[in-house]
Amino acid sequence: MKKWFMIGGAIAPFCLLLVVILLLICMFGGVKMKEEANNPMGGAYVCSPTGEIHKEMWEAAFSQAGVLKDKGNKYIEVAKKQGIDPVLFAAISFHETAWGKSQAVTTKNNPGGLMTSSGLMSFATLDDGLEAMGVTLHNRILVDGKITIEDLGSVYAPVGASNDPSGLNVYWVPTVKEIAAKLGGLTMNCTLSGAELPDGTPYFPIVMEEMVKYEGRPYVWGGSNPSQGFDCSGLVQWAFAKAGIQLPRTAVEQFNVVVPISAEEAKPGDLVFFYGTYGAPSHVSHVGVFTGNGKMYNANGSGVGYSDITKGYWAEHRPTFGRIIGRSG
């Protein structure tokens, strides 16, 4: 994958070099922070728990996809024809086109960074571009045997490639995984194994499937559903209800119905509580869902998403774990 960065204007060589260095520092720092925040399991959790397209997540992702927003059915049609995973197809396309907003897709109907030796390919219609990309993916996956996202990354964005002097290709695999998760998870060549999703409570995949729909949404005090938005306990209550588990409304009430466990016993899907994030230091004031590897998924003042509980603010507020037992129905 080729990437060019241009800085215009008449800038002295020394100043130009300084600007480039500063931009690269900001770029890498920002991407790294986002990767750590959104992919605490190394970009994992990309398998659909049901093996089918999750209609709501699929449509929600496409609603943000620029000129591709109305092409969800076309992706499915082409994927079926070519024998490939529509979620993988869409995830790569969204990444290659900056979620349907790049010049390649808006001016050339090129939805997948398709190139010849002369440069980016142009297509008469967007549907033509999708058909061509489908053929390309068919060849890479079914002919060449590039089944996994990592395999495809070695073709689309090889790490260390001469045409990637800034080293940005290293982010291709985790970003495509992140987008696949937002689309509801891969439906082919994918299993919910330890390599994909940490061993956890039986309901963890369903809870995570629901919570990641709302990633990036703002925190809303008193919010307990998607229409209102979510506060910490509202998100937990809503997501666990999707798994058939009924929890009370507030963090304190949820704390009172779990079985206390140690940090060493905690599994993904257990709850993690915090003291004194507001009010008295002895007050249970926040709750999140433990996702493993020292992370939780929660709604907090920074919005809905992952947080590191091993250091900084959260570590200072006494993370305490609890397991939900016998709350179904």
Image (spheres, rainbow, N blue to C red):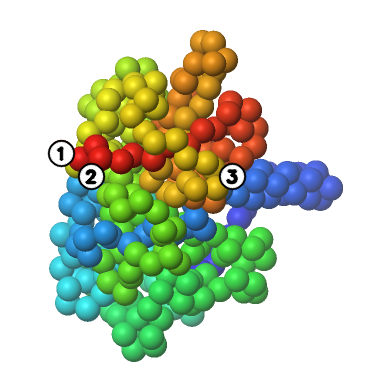
For the residue carrying disc 2, how many other residues have a C-alpha within 10 Å: few (<14), some (14-19), or many (20+)?
some
Q: Residue at x 50, y 55 (%)?
A: 41
For the residue carrying disc 1, how many other residues have a C-alpha within 10 Å: few (<14), some (14-19), or many (20+)?
few
Q: Residue at x 64, y 37 (%)?
A: 311
Q: Which residue is mark 3?
A: 33
Q: Is residue 244 at all visible to an observer of this figure?
A: yes
Q: Estimate the x, y position of residue 327 in percent, counting from the top left.
A: 24, 37
Judged by depth in the image, the label closer to the viewer, 3 or 2, is 2
Q: From the viewer's perspective, tell me whether residue 175 is left or right of residue 110.
A: right
Mark on residue 166? Answer: none
For the residue carrying disc 3, how many other residues have a C-alpha within 10 Å: few (<14), some (14-19), or many (20+)?
few
Residue that sits furthest to the bottom in the current view: 143
Q: Estimate the x, y position of residue 51 in percent, counting from the top left.
A: 22, 65
Q: Estimate the x, y position of residue 300 in percent, counting from the top left.
A: 46, 27
Judged by depth in the image, the label closer to the viewer, 3 or 1, is 1
Instruction: Specify the amino acid type for callout 3.
Output: Met
278 and 123: which one is in front?
A: 278
Residue 89, compared with residue 57, is above or below; it is: below
Q: From the viewer's perspective, tell me whether residue 36 is left or right of residue 55.
A: right
Instruction: Specify the amino acid type for callout 1.
Output: Gly
Q: Secondary structure at mark 3?
A: helix
Q: Which residue is mark 1?
A: 329
Residue that sits furthest to the right in the current view: 14
First along the sequence among labels 3 and 2 = 3
Mark on residue 243? Answer: 2
Q: Estimate the x, y position of residue 100 in percent, counting from the top left.
A: 34, 52
Residue 109, compared with residue 281, is above or below; it is: below
